[in-house]
Structure formats: C-alpha cells, structure tokens
Image (cartoon, rainbow, N blue to C red):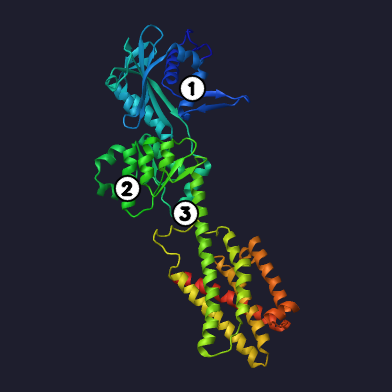
Amino acid sequence: MPPTANCAAGARSTVDEADALCGFARAALLCNDAQLHRGDDGAWSVAGDPMEGALLALAHKAGLDPIAERARHRRLDDIPFDAAHRFMATLNQDGAGGNTITVKGAPDHVITLCANQIAGDGVAPLEHEAWLKRIDALAREGQRVLAFAVKFVGDQATLGMNDMAEGFTLLGIAGFIDPPRPEAIEAVADCARAGIDVKMITGDHAVTALAIAGQLGLNTRNGVLTGNQIEAMDDEELRRRVADVDVFARAAPEHKLRLVEALQACGKVVAMTGDGVNDAPALKRADVGVAMGIKGTEAAKEAARVVLADDNFASIVAAVREGRTIYDNIRKVIAWTLPTNGGESLVIVGAILLGFVLPVSPVQILWINMVTAVALGLTLSFEPAEPSVMERRPRPSNASLLDMEMVWRIVLVSILFAGAVFALFFWSIERGDELAYARTLVVNLIVVMEIFYLFSVRYLHLTSLTFTGVVGTPAVLLGVGLTVILQLVFTYAPFMQAVFETRPIALADGAIVIGIGVGLLLLLEAEKVVRRRLL
C-alpha cells in the first residue's frame, strides 16, 4: 500500500488502488465472526476461525479499527457459512443511510453471483476469465482462496437466500498460505511406510487440494475427485474410484459420509478426522472417529471415539505407533508365558505317564513360577517399540492373538524346554548324582532357559542378536538381575536348601546349564530367520 493510503473511518486516500483495498479490507472485517485479542505480553490471539483472524489482521494493517467499523456498519442480519452453499453473507448498514450485503466464500461460486468488479475509476464489467486465471494461479501455489463481493440493497432490513442470486460487485480475492506442519509431512510418510493409506477430504478448490496434497507427500497421480463428481457416481463406481484416489475437494459433509462407507465396503478399517457439527455423521460411521479437541465442536467430540488434545495429525500416527507397541507386548507376554509353562507341564506330565521320577518337585515348580512370572514376565510389558513397528502393514481386523505362528512357537519351545530338562536330569542321574542335586540342576536350567528365551521373544519380527537386543532394557536387566540373585540364594543358601531340598551346584555344571540356555537362544534365533525367509 502506498504511504499516503489511509483506511481509517472517514479518511480518504488519494490513491484509487488504496481505496479499493480499503473497501476490500472493510468487507473482510464486516463479513467476519472472529475477534482479535492482544494479551498483556503484547502477543495477539484469535478467537474464532484462523482464516477470519488473518482477515482481521489485514484490516488492522489497512488502518481500520474493527470496533469502530462494526459500530458504524452495524450488522442487521447474516447467513452463516455452510458447505452446501459455500459462502457467508452479512447485511450491514453502509454508514450513508442504506444497507449493503457483503459475501465471502468459494471464489468459483462467488464470481457467479457477480456482474461487475471494482475498478480504479469505480465499477467495471466483470472480467470472468481473468479472475479465474488469478484464482487458479493462487490455488496452484497451495493457497486457500476466498472471494469478496458486495451489493447495495437500499433500506432492506433482512437477508435471505433469495437475495444471493445475482447483482453483486466483486471486490477481490484473498489467498491464505497455510503450509503443512513439518511433523504432519513426516507423519504422512510414516503412514505410508506403515501401510496406512492417507486420504485428504477438503472443502478447498480442487487445484489447491492437489497442491497441498503434493506438499504433504500424498499420492496425486490419480488426480482429485470433487463433491460434484462424487454426487454423480453410484455406490459401486465410488467404491472403485475411492481405492485409487487420495484427494477429494469441494466435499460437503454428506460426501464425507459416502466416502467413509465406500472405504468400509472395500474392507478397509477407516479412521476419520473432523471438527464441525456437520462432520458428526461421518465421525460416527467411521471405525475410529477422531475429533479435534481445540477447534472441534461439541457435536463432533460427542460423535468421535477419540479427541485430539492438540489438533495435530502427527498425534494420530503416534497413537498408532503406541497401539502397535502395546499389541506386540501383549503377544510377547503370551509368547513367553505359554511356552515356558507348557515346557514345565510337559516335564511333569511326561514323567508321570512314563513312570519316571519327577525331575522337579512340586514345591520347586512353585518357586520357579513365583520368581520368573514376576521378575521376568512382567518386564515384557515395558518393552519399547521394535524398530520395524511402523514398517509393517496393518494386521487384519479379525487377526487372532494366537495365530499359527504363535501356536508353532509355543509347541516348539515347550518341546525344547522339556527335552533339555529330561536330557540334563537323566545325564546327572546316570553319572551318579543324588536326586536332590539333579533336581537343583533342573530348576536352574528351567530358570536359565526362561531368561534366554526372554531375550529371544523381545523381538517378534527381528533378530535379537544385536547389541540392543542383548543388552536389554532397564526393566529386563532389573528382572534378570533379581532372578539371578534369587536363584543363587535358592541354590547356595542353607535355609533355602532345607526348604526346597537343593544342593550347591559345581561351577562346571553351572557352565553347562548356561551353555544350554545360550544354545536355546541361538537355535530359536536361527528358527526365526528361517521362518521369516520361508514365509
């Protein structure tokens, strides 16, 4: 704006372009429900829609006082914005004894209401094609575009949809730069690696939507579907197109609902985000409705299953990561608990059925379960996410915790546990050890194998033979350390020997027990590699 321009109420500029800009800024201020507030620290904040807040900032910079302008041009009536008609309109006093309708909205729609445009020397016929080119240029830069127009209506005191058919004068268009957050771009990339399809549904212009989608890293090769195109499709055709297209523009709430239903009909599990009252049906219909906690309406929050406290898409991806980690940890606890108990059960049942002396006494089994279930089993609940947790495709919604892979692992480990126990027990008896000594060896072997198997099961999808896998987490190290201390007390403390009928183990035999545990870990890791390659 030239230095001589001044849009303050009652002031006149000597520059025609500045006059036009003043009129544009005044319209942006009047057709606006937001408020700007300045805090004690001097920082400005917006109460209302951020885009309307930006328009108020424009009015401030143009020299307009919102309070004074709104008092001078008192609002008499309005038509709130709705996705169905894609504009907002207000009826204001013009300060000269008449009233004026001001409209702001989607530029391709507002232009259809206009016959004229503001020119340097007053009003001129609308240059329709020139304006469409300007709108398209801004949209290709990823800017959200709004158009503003006015119509003088004399002393008319009410405003209805019949007044919005024609006769407006275009004041201009405004482009809004709202670049995607860096964390949102990263989150979209994380979703792609995790096998999650991200689809953008917006009320923006189709060209703007494609530009923003490109900035986010979404697939734009298959173009964009608009709300009008969606309306023209039957359900079958929409199901075919929705699988390939990731960008949907000029979408109304009913289009969002149809898109959710179409994706679900394709067998997809759909998470839908929204913040408006009209988003509630789609949020309710989605498998996971996600409402915005800051900008979201109460209707949207009530319809959703999840409310984002920070309105950040990256938080959804973080929740997916946490959910996968929790699910993995549940599987790890099961994969550790069932085989270890299964191995102990096979030892007892096998000895009874075959008429052998029990390799371990009932009270010793009680000791094993009491120590390992607490000190070892619970540590898996604190496992961090595996490095590949966001590089796997989502599991089927009907997937079972006990799938065939898990059942195979339970059977294999149970057999290996039982086989190692019987081998060590009979080897000890054959060389002439007393029963109490052989049983002490067996108890320590079971505990040692459970420790080494714990390190194997910490990684369900990757090898555990890495520095991180071997070192373990603080919880694992604490659990293993506590178990080792308790086993030393169990084996060598005289009062424990009296209670559990244990005997001190020779160093060489202790090395054999540890060697069997190491062998179990290596065997299971080899099996894990072979199974991954075969599957």
Q: CA gap, disc 3 to disc 2?
A: 25 Å
Q: What secondary structure is found at the residue carrying circle 2?
A: helix
Q: Amino acid at mark 2?
A: Glu
Q: Compare residues 233 and 182 and report the one nearer the observer.
A: 233
Q: What secondary structure is found at the residue carrying circle 3?
A: helix
- How far from the left and from the top, in percent, is residue 483? 67, 70
In which quadrant is the C terminus drawn?
bottom left
Q: Amino acid at mark 1?
A: Leu
| Residue 471 at least partly seen | no
Q: Which residue is mark 1?
A: 56
What residue is at 60 percent from the left and 63 percent from the top? 379
Of marks 3 and 2, the one in the foreground: 2
What residue is at 34 percent from the left and 55 percent from the top? 267
Q: What secondary structure is found at the residue carrying circle 1?
A: helix
Disc with the residue nearer the chain's start (3 vs 2) = 3
**Which image quadrant for residue 232?**
top left
**Which image quadrant for residue 357?**
bottom right
Q: Compare residues 502 and 158 and report the one nearer the observer.
A: 502
Q: Amino acid at mark 3?
A: Arg
Q: Which mark is residue 261?
A: 2
Please rate how many residues cluster around mark 1, counting C-alpha atoms within 10 Å: few if below 14, some from 14 to 19, many from 20.
Answer: many
Q: Which residue is mark 3?
A: 193
- How far from the left and from the top, in percent, is residue 26? 44, 16
Compared to residue 419, the image places residue 62 above or below, namely above
What residue is at 44 percent from the left and 72 percent from the top? 534
